[in-house]
Amino acid sequence: ACEDTPYTSRSAVKMITRAFLAFSVPLIIAAVSTAAYDIQFLRSIYPEDTPQNRSRNFGNPPCLQSCDENGAITADTLQKCVEKCANVGYCCGNRLEIKGGEDSSNNLLSCANGCEIAFYSTTVDECKGHCEMGNNARWCNYRHPFTENNFRKCGECVCDNSPAVSSTDCRDGCLQAKTLEEFYVHDNTACNGPEDIPRFL
């Protein structure tokens, strides 16, 4: 019988090491790629701190729902702005009128969505900033930090001959809301009551 030599032992170790690396390296690369993708996805849902979304402190943390003295937007209030959108040719309607509401389409936010975002904003530029984040968000949903339900961007507007939603529709909703007194008065730093849900992401 042949006895093992230092040479054959070293060869066996090298073979085992190469086999281990050949198996583990692709798994490590795949894990890193998945983690990077997940981070990008989470950032699209929970935007980083920006001048438009800078009220993060422990005294008055921002909330996932509207909980300040202005309250959450109602279907009637939103309809005032949605009608302004309709008057200039936009079709997507009021998602708060019925359970489930109306979706936007084309993976973009509608003029009506811009109206709703305007209610939870303090300036037109802040509203437009959220429109931009929503349009760039991955998948078909956008989670605004102050609305109860996600904006759905991959449905169809319920009307005939609906024009395709474009990247400017949401920003136009911000502008339509500017003339209405109920909009742009939201205070996103004053959260109180049982519905407070602080965000630390």
Image (cartoon, rainbow, N blue to C red):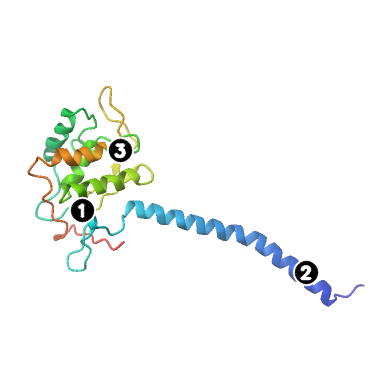
Indicate whether 61 appears above or below 112: below
The residue that label 2 is drawn on is 12
On residue 162, which mark appears? none
Q: Residue at x 31, y 58 (%)?
A: 48
Q: What residue type is labelled 1?
A: Gln
Question: Among all residues in the image, which is located at the extreme left?
Answer: 181
Which corner quadrant of the image does residue 103 belong to? top left
Q: Which residue is drawn at 29% across and 45% down?
A: 132
Q: Nearer the viewer, mark 1 or mark 3?
A: 3
Q: What residue type is labelled 3?
A: Ser
Q: What element carries label 1?
A: loop
Indicate whether 21 appears above or below 4: above
Specify whether 129 is left or right of 184: right
The residue that label 1 is drawn on is 65
Answer few, some or many: residues within 10 Å of disc 2's Cα (few below 14, many 20 plus, some between 14 and 19): few
Residue 187 x, y percent position in the rendering: 13, 55
Q: Is mark 2 on a helix, strand or loop?
A: helix
Report the Cα–Cα distance between label 1 and label 3: 26 Å
Q: Earlier in the sequence, mark 2 or mark 1?
A: 2
Answer few, some or many: residues within 10 Å of disc 3's Cα (few below 14, many 20 plus, some between 14 and 19): some
